[in-house]
Image: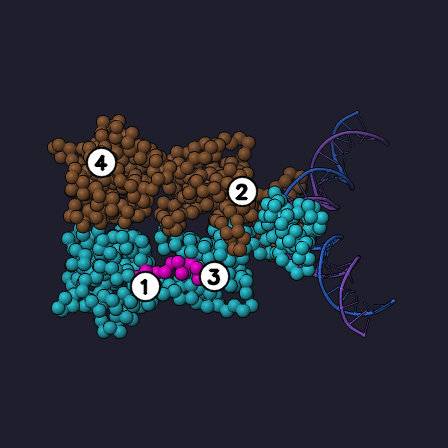
Chain colours: A brown, B cyan, C purple, D blue
Amino acid sequence: MVTITDISRRCNVSRATVSKALNGHSDINAETAAHIRQAAKEMGYLPNATARALKLGRSHNIGVLFVDKTSSGLGHEYFSQILESVKQEAERSGYDITFISRDIGTLHMDYYEHAKYRNCDGVIVASVDFTDPAVIKLVNSDIPTVTLDYVFDSHSAVLSDNVGGMADLVRFVYDRGHRKIAFIHGEPTSVTQKRLASFHKTCSELGLTIPEEYVEAATFHDPKASGLATRRLLALKDRPTCILYPDDFSFIGGMNELEKQGVSIPGDMSVAGYDGILLSQVLRPRLTTYRQDAEAMGREAAHELVEIIERPKEWIPRQIMIPGRLLTGDTVRDIREGF
Amino acid sequence: MVTITDISRRCNVSRATVSKALNGHSDINAETAAHIRQAAKEMGYLPNATARALKLGRSHNIGVLFVDKTSSGLGHEYFSQILESVKQEAERSGYDITFISRDIGTLHMDYYEHAKYRNCDGVIVASVDFTDPAVIKLVNSDIPTVTLDYVFDSHSAVLSDNVGGMADLVRFVYDRGHRKIAFIHGEPTSVTQKRLASFHKTCSELGLTIPEEYVEAATFHDPKASGLATRRLLALKDRPTCILYPDDFSFIGGMNELEKQGVSIPGDMSVAGYDGILLSQVLRPRLTTYRQDAEAMGREAAHELVEIIERPKEWIPRQIMIPGRLLTGDTVRDIREGF
DNA sequence: TTTTTGAACGTAATCGATTTCGATACTTGT
DNA sequence: ACAAGTATCGAAATCGATTACGTTCAAAAA
């Protein structure tokens, strides 16, 4: 392994000079610097990130905290895409990605300790239980953090537009004549709260009164739960004409139930999903769904974190709202008069 | 930040003693060691992985090389699961995960250089173009590597049982009376080669002669390509009775095409997928598919890599075959006489 | 000519932890 | 009681890179 010392010997200069030449300091003669850089290239020199990190106290490493209670972990397409996008943006700025978790090896540590142990310059927190004390400890530590889909005081966050998305969906189906709109939501998280609030707000803005039975609880990413919720909705004496699902994957469970009961989509029942994962756009009929811009979320989160790390003075906490896009699909039937 | 020096001052011992006490060396008095450990705990001491890595030349960091030409990157459920599993097993052994890529920041480097730069103790290589010179350079370097689904000479590899899986599928449909079996395969990779060879071998063992037109080329994870291939198969004067798809996601494209042409599954056409992703088991009818044990693959790959890193003497390259499991599903109809 | 100035480079400390090689004091054997 | 052995701990080098500060020497200013 070629070190700075090897280069210094080859060029008959001190290690300090080599370091300064390689980092473009101004107090090195241009010719000398060129010579050193040439030698470094010839010798195949690579800076040692570890040594650099030790000396500078900056690792150029970003931690990513992705925990999923359902243990599907990275399995969710939405989070996989965010992660991929975080990775790309981070690399563009010269940062690498390290996963943060507890209990690495025999060491028993929490998230904060792990991040500290690895000298992470910052951490992106997503898909976790934000009420977990370990998460709160990390966020309120000296390590810069950016959260996804959750806001902590005095911290930056990247948010998908759950309010706007839900409103778009409701208005879309309303415009197609639907008045009896059911909503199956996920487990009680801040995301669910926002969507639920937006659902009710938009409905009342449109003058709709939604009976309690039209709002069903299920679980995110769980076709079984949504299938059961669908069954309950179908059992109502006054069936809804449209069902909104908590996510595209949950929709599959509803789809199966509808099919089993001989309810055709969208002939007998209109449906819509949420997320806009790849699957929803290859199924036929194409699912009407609100596509979250996972790519933008990951990119913005990484970008914001790098800003905090590199420009802590000028930085003020902000919430970055990432708008999604309604994918109209073919699962919502137009039931207006004359259609 | 509490360092070893802080502890040494508090305990009136040298830094060497603290280090040895914390690492359980035998030349430290039991009481002294206990006292030091107690102080370390009270002061909230955390070892500095960076300093340790610099001194020891071991980072306890494993690189992961996941590149996907289709740029869906981590989007594939199969690879996401492998990654998650790699991560868990690595952490169990005290290793963290870092992504390896080229061109980190403004530094222009290849995979090997990146891994070296980050002092990775080893790298897991998956889902890449194994003919890429940069990949070959990495694998043939001084950095231990384990590849997934591809074998390099004198290197360990973890392989899903493509031969056995394909054979299982063919025999399964054969047992249900199918003789006209079509196979849509993915782009020409080593995986495709193995499946193709196994397909032909198994067919001939069963005494089947498969016409050329029954073997169609498509692309992995691409419903459009498989949809077109399906259309070509349906256009044949002598249609197959069963179609094997390159993967579950590709099956969706076929499903759409079949539905469009009014061909029911499995009434008019039997089908099977490959991978056994979550989706395949929530769709109705449940897809007959060969489930790759992604969890085991990731685990074994990480475990093998740690072995290479920690026991280089005793280690000899080996290929670890991970068997999958046939998920029988409901998409293959029994067309034998009397059924 | 003397002083000042600045370009160019080196010295040495530093980051935090590990480890080799002693050094010291104490115990044991003879 | 003296040599030898043992338990315990410390001094200092080391990993690779960075940087504050000092030094040198020559050119410019006084």
Label 1 sits on a secondary structure element that is strand
Residue of label 3:
B303
Q: CA distance from mark 1 to mark 3?
A: 22 Å
Magenta residues (range): B290-305
Q: Between A212 and A261, which is closer to the camera in this rendering? A: A212
Residue of label 2:
A121
Q: Between A69 and B152, which is closer to the camera in this rendering? A: A69
Question: Chain ID for label 4?
Answer: A
Q: Between A64 and B250, which is closer to the camera in this rendering? A: A64
Quadrant location of the N terminus of chain A?
bottom right
**Mark 3 neighbour density, 10 Å: few (under 14) some (14–19) many (20 or more):** some
Residue of label 1:
B325
Does residue B107 appear in this view? Answer: no
Q: Quadrant of residue B216?
A: bottom left
Residue at mark 1 shares a chain with residue at mark 4:
no
Q: Are marks 1 and 2 in contact (CB under 8 Å)?
A: no
Q: CA distance from mark 1 to mark 4?
A: 42 Å
Q: Left or right: A103 with respect to A69?
A: right
Q: Nearer the viewer, mark 2 or mark 3?
A: 3
